[in-house]
Image (cartoon, rainbow, N blue to C red):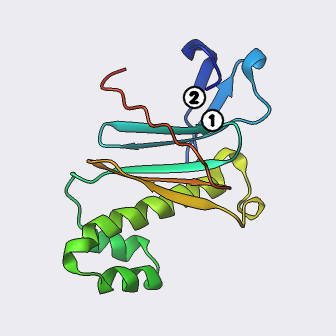
Amino acid sequence: MLGIDNEQIVVTEREAQAPLLTLSPQHDPPSFYFSLSHSRGWIACAASVSCHVGLDIEDKNSPRNIAALSAAAFTPDEMSWLGKLPEAQRVEAFYRLWNCNEALYKLLHNQGQEPQAINAGWNCRILLHARLGICLCSVREVSVVNIVELNAI
């Protein structure tokens, strides 16, 4: 995307915050936005030079107590919506709702952005994958999403 060597990209973990990505000064574009997510050995990164992004992935094959997680994380309206679905659709719906909530949270809080600065016009999209639940949110519709899946680094 930016034509930068890996050595010129530094990712710094920060406690209770999104990771910080720093580029060498000669490659520091005026607008570069990214979001990282991981789940059970999977790592994902969304990057954009046009708008803020938030990304979440979850490994759907890992055993979870969906009812307990829903009760702990979802609003009463979200719980009601989920509970009205046929049992066969609830697990997939849980991951979609979970992923979108997480991706939207990341969109609103990434890179030191104040939540009120991104308060309207955001767009969330589900990306289909056989094993992962994936949601990408952005401050405006992203027309092209390129997915690159690597078997090893």
State the image coordinates of residue 15 (x, y, percent, origin top left). Answer: 55, 43
Q: Please tell me the numbered disc located at residue 11.
A: 2
Q: Quadrant of the C terminus?
A: top left
Label 1 element class: strand
Residue plotted at (70% across, 61% down): 115
Residue 9 or residue 88, whichever sits in front: 88
State the image coordinates of residue 109 (x, y, percent, origin top left). Answer: 64, 54
Q: Quadrant of residue 9?
A: top right
Q: Quadrant of the N terminus?
A: top right
Residue extending farthest to the front is 143
Q: Say left or right for 25 vs 43.
A: right
Residue 39 or residue 122, whichever sits in front: 122
State the image coordinates of residue 77 (x, y, percent, origin top left). Answer: 46, 85
Q: Please tell me the numbered disc located at residue 20.
A: 1
Residue plotted at (38% across, 86% down): 80
Q: Are marks 2 and 1 in contact (CB under 8 Å)?
A: yes
Q: Please tell me the numbered disc located at residue 81.
A: none
Q: Quadrant of residue 60?
A: bottom left
Give whichever of discs 2 and 1 has the lower sequence position: 2
Question: Residue type at mark 1?
Answer: Leu
Crowding at dot 1, Cα within 10 Å, few <14 / some 14-19 / many 20+, comes out as some
State the image coordinates of residue 42 (x, y, percent, origin top left). Answer: 34, 38
Label 2 element class: strand
Q: Say left or right for 65 vs 114.
A: left
* 43 to 85, vertically: above or below: above
* 59 to 69, vertically: above or below: above
Crowding at dot 2, Cα within 10 Å, few <14 / some 14-19 / many 20+, comes out as few
Residue 11 or residue 140, whichever sits in front: 140
Residue plotted at (26% across, 47% down): 131
Question: Residue type at mark 2?
Answer: Val
